[in-house]
Image (spheres, rainbow, N blue to C red):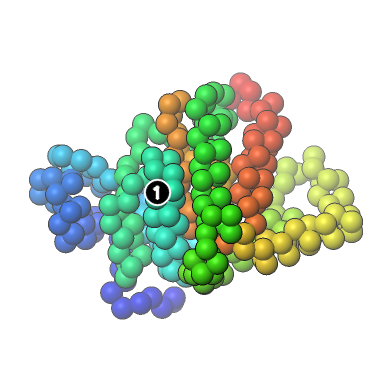
């Protein structure tokens, strides 16, 4: 069994109301008595517990880190400290980009829990793109988000001491960085348990990647840059699954992979997800 800090308790849809009731500003925001609150667990979180909480006067989303990957279980331990880095990044993003991220209502370090603005009727962008929905505001919003969050946390805007302080503040988020180092820069180019592709149709392509030494050398150079080039504060997992939006409003969520790294990684992740969506559209037609 994975050990957790004293005071940490993983919440459930039945225990969360009593937990939130202990925080006056959250209880006031929801209104009424805790037994009048409705708590729904959102089941699509890969790493964390996510809940929607509705009260007579308001609502909120609550995200809590587990000491392991939620989708896999205790066989894949993951530090609770990722909630700390997510809170730091969200706070910085809110300062720099305003309405482009959900507003934070409360953070509990011991419980690794963040209460924040509930985004409704927003949906995950990946789902909307699969459904063929057009988002006319997204290009302006995501470019503003990246421009402000990357520029103002880089040497272009920060003093040397402030920049070094940010590097130090995010330097402990090693477990999340390791996931990226493995899943993006290492595993796709070798035989690995977590690799997935459409078999047997893409078998030749997967084999070609594993056998392409020039490709592996090029990717290794990019991996080195990812690991050593602390240019700016990255979201670290900026793709269409980390954006909730409507046709008029865009919000960037889930920056728990945040660290100080090369600016091009966030930009490239967004562009790559658009390319993946484009090439997958034929398979989604008629569904």
Q: How many numbered tags mark residues here?
A: 1
Q: Residue furthest top?
A: 286
Residue at 81% x, 49% y is 206
- Left or right of residue 47: residue 177: right
Q: Is residue 29 left or right of residue 66?
A: left
Residue 88 x %, y %: 42, 60
Quadrant of residue 174 in the image?
A: bottom right
- 260 and 13: which is toward the camera: 260
67 shown above or below 243 = below
Kindly identify the residue that appears in the image at 68 percent across and 56 percent down. Answer: 184
The quarter of the displayed image where residue 49 is located: bottom left
Q: What is the x, y in percent for residue 167?
A: 54, 68
Viewer-nearest residue: 210 or 236: 236
Q: Is residue 30 among what the camera can see?
A: yes
**What residue is at 76 percent from the left and 44 percent from the top?**
199
239 left or right, relative to 214: left
Spot the residue most to the left.
33
Dot 1, crowdedness within 10 Å: few (<14), some or many (≥20)? some
Residue designated by label 1: 94
Location of the N terminus (image quadrant): bottom left
User: Is the residue 123 above or below the residue 29 in the image?
Assistant: above
| Left or right side of 185 for 249 | left
- Residue 203, percent across and down? 82, 46
Residue 181 lies in quadrant: bottom right
Residue displayed at 18% across by 54% down: 25
Residue 209 image point, x, y percent: 83, 52
């Amino acid at each position: 069994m994975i050990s957790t800090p004293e005071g940490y308790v993983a919440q459930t849809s039945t225990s969360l109301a009593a937990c939130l009731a202990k925080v006056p500003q959250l209880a006031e925001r929801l209104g009424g008595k805790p037994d009048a609150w409705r708590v729904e667990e959102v089941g699509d979180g890969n790493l964390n517990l996510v809940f929607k909480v509705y009260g007579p006067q308001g609502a909120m989303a609550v995200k809590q880190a587990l000491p392991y990957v939620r989708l896999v279980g205790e066989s894949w331990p993951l530090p609770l400290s990722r909630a700390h880095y997510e809170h730091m990044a969200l706070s910085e993003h809110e300062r720099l980009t305003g309405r482009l991220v959900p507003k934070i209502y409360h953070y509990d370090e011991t419980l690794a829990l963040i209460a924040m603005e509930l985004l409704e009727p927003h949906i995950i962008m990946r789902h909307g793109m699969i459904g063929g929905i057009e988002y006319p505001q997204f290009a302006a919003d995501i470019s503003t988000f990246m421009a402000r969050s990357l520029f103002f946390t880089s040497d272009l805007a920060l003093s040397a001491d402030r920049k070094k302080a940010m590097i130090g503040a995010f330097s402990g988020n090693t477990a999340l960085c390791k996931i990226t180092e493995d899943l993006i820069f290492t595993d796709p180019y070798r035989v690995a348990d977590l690799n997935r592709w459409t078999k047997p149709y893409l078998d030749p392509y997967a084999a070609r990647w594993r056998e392409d030494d020039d490709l592996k050398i090029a990717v290794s150079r990019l991996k080195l840059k990812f690991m050593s080039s602390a240019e700016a504060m990255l979201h670290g997992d900026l793709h269409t699954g980390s954006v909730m939006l409507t046709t008029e409003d865009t919000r960037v969520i889930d920056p728990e992979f945040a660290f100080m790294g090369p600016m091009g990684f966030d930009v490239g992740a967004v562009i790559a997800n658009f390319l993946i969506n484009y090439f997958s559209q034929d398979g989604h037609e008629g569904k």
